[in-house]
Image (spheres, rainbow, N blue to C red):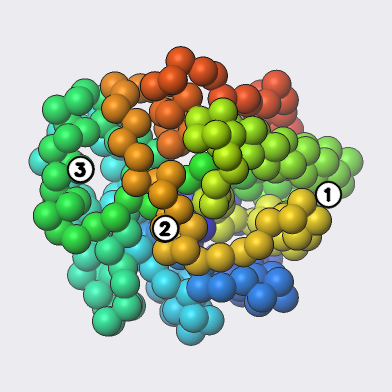
Amino acid sequence: MEPQRAVRFLLPPGLRRSDIARSIIAALQAHHAPPTYGFLNAKGLAEGPDNAEVLRLWRAAGHPLANHAFSHMDLNANTAEAFEQDVIANEATLRTYMGDGDWHWLRYPYLREGDTPQKRQAVAAFLKDHGYRVAEATLNFDDWAYNDQYARCLSKDDFEAIEWMRESYFRRASDSLTAGQEGAKLAYGRDIAHVMLLHIGGFETVMLPELLDLLEQRGFRLVTLQEAESDPAYAVDQGVAPGAGATPLERMGAARQATPPGTADDALAGLGGLCR
């Protein structure tokens, strides 16, 4: 999950970011989730003390933090050197909040690992030299896209639109689980330990309990990032050019010239027009 981002989601009326964090932490606790990594963009701390309170709450609940680049920099749109400096700029804050804890995980912003082989190789070498592991994600259904519209719809008391959003989110989440499992079998010949990308935002206060129930109903067991990415699938070098896909499943599918299953849901296009 990402408790901080360079681009902030709109806040629902009457909620602070720390209120959202408390709700998400409570949902994780209710489902006995193990320590869950939050990926930090420390640039956002300058916006106000409540952002620091999110990090304090996260750590107090026993959840770790890791690196998501200081300003959420897009590696594809910047040089390797600039991206490396953005990663380093995040480290002082990580040391402050994590102490001796393991914060040497990097999730690439936008899951973009470089638009040229040279850039991708340079940053990969930098991360290895600095003791980082890449926090891959195999399950991603763009949960972030619902947060601004939820805030707008709630401010207008448009509960019909919110119900449509709830059904859409749940459907996309369910479809992503199916696509992830089918994609793993296509790419690796078996299902693997998955990592789901989620964001801290207002709509997650509504949907995270339902999402965690769905995972349980579908037979998933919550584990730590370290346990999930100890699956040998994450050590496989897909050997494909940048642009082949954002997730390991997509990259492996491209390497084997097999397209992983996706979703035909066009809900994201419909979201943009809600409650304007």
If you read the primary sequence from the N terminus, does the residue marked by circle 2 or circle 1 appear first? 1
Residue 124 is labelled as 3
Residue situated in front as seen by the camera: 6 or 276: 6
Q: Is mark 3 on a helix, strand or loop?
A: helix
Q: In this view, does 226 lie above or below 266?
A: below
Label 3 sits on what residue type?
Answer: Ala
**Classed neighbour count for the residue bearing mark 2: other residues with Cα under 10 Å, few (<14), some (14–19), many (≥20):** few
If you read the primary sequence from the N terminus, does the residue marked by circle 3 or circle 2 appear first? 3
- Residue at the spot of label 1: 157
> Relative to 173, is 87 on the left or the right?
left
- Residue at the spot of label 2: 230
| Contact? badges 1 and 3 (CB < 8 Å) | no
Residue 55 location in percent, x, y? Answer: 43, 73
Residue 27 location in percent, x, y? Answer: 69, 70
Label 2 sits on what residue type?
Answer: Ser
Residue 163 location in percent, x, y? Answer: 85, 44
User: Spatial distance from mark 3 to mark 2, Cα to Cα?
Assistant: 18 Å
Locate the C terminus by quadrant: top right
The residue at 26%/31% (across/down) is: 114
User: Spatial distance from mark 1 to mark 3, Cα to Cα?
Assistant: 47 Å
